[in-house]
Image: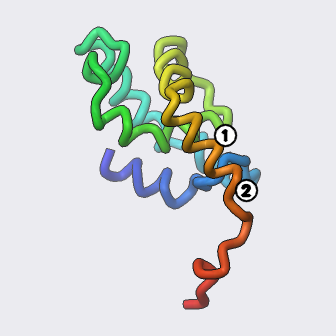
Amino acid sequence: MDQAKPSLRANGSRECAPDDRLREAIHGTAWRHFCTIWRECLARSGGPFLFGERSMADAMYAPVVTRFMTYDVKLEPRLATYAGMIMALPEMQEWIEAAKAEPADIEELEVEY
């Protein structure tokens, strides 16, 4: 996972709209690592969340779920159910709506390095 997350972070836009330049990278090997982790956690806990009850692990993977949805990563049924459940959480819906309301450009963040 330590190698997968930086790759996904570097290659996956945090925006809710897909970036076609990144689609191929998202469908690479990084997503398979996350799927393995989710599959094993759900199998051990019995679900519906990664450790049975909702936990910080589910919150940590919420941004990964959004990238999977944005880039239309095909998940096996149990993982798709998990991802759909995360996306349906009221907090996720609030987060997505807040992101959509943000301006496309934030002047304070436009810094040259």
Quarter holding the C terminus is: bottom right
The secondary element bearing badge 2 is classed as: helix
Query: Residue 78, image x and y in percent?
Result: 47, 13
Is 1 situated left or right of 111 in this image?
A: left
Q: Nearer the viewer, mark 1 or mark 2?
A: 1
Query: Of the residues shown, which amino acid type is indicated by label 2?
Result: Arg
The secondary element bearing badge 1 is classed as: loop
Give the residue number, with chain letter if any, for mark 1. 71
Q: Nearer the viewer, residue 60 or 34?
A: 60
Q: Nearer the viewer, residue 6 or 59?
A: 59
Residue in view at x 49 percent, y 51 percent: 8
**What label does residue 21 carry, if any?**
2
Residue in view at x 62 percent, y 25 percent: 74
| On screen, residue 53 above or below 104 | above
Is 5 situated left or right of 71 in this image?
A: left
| On screen, residue 30 above or below 55 | below
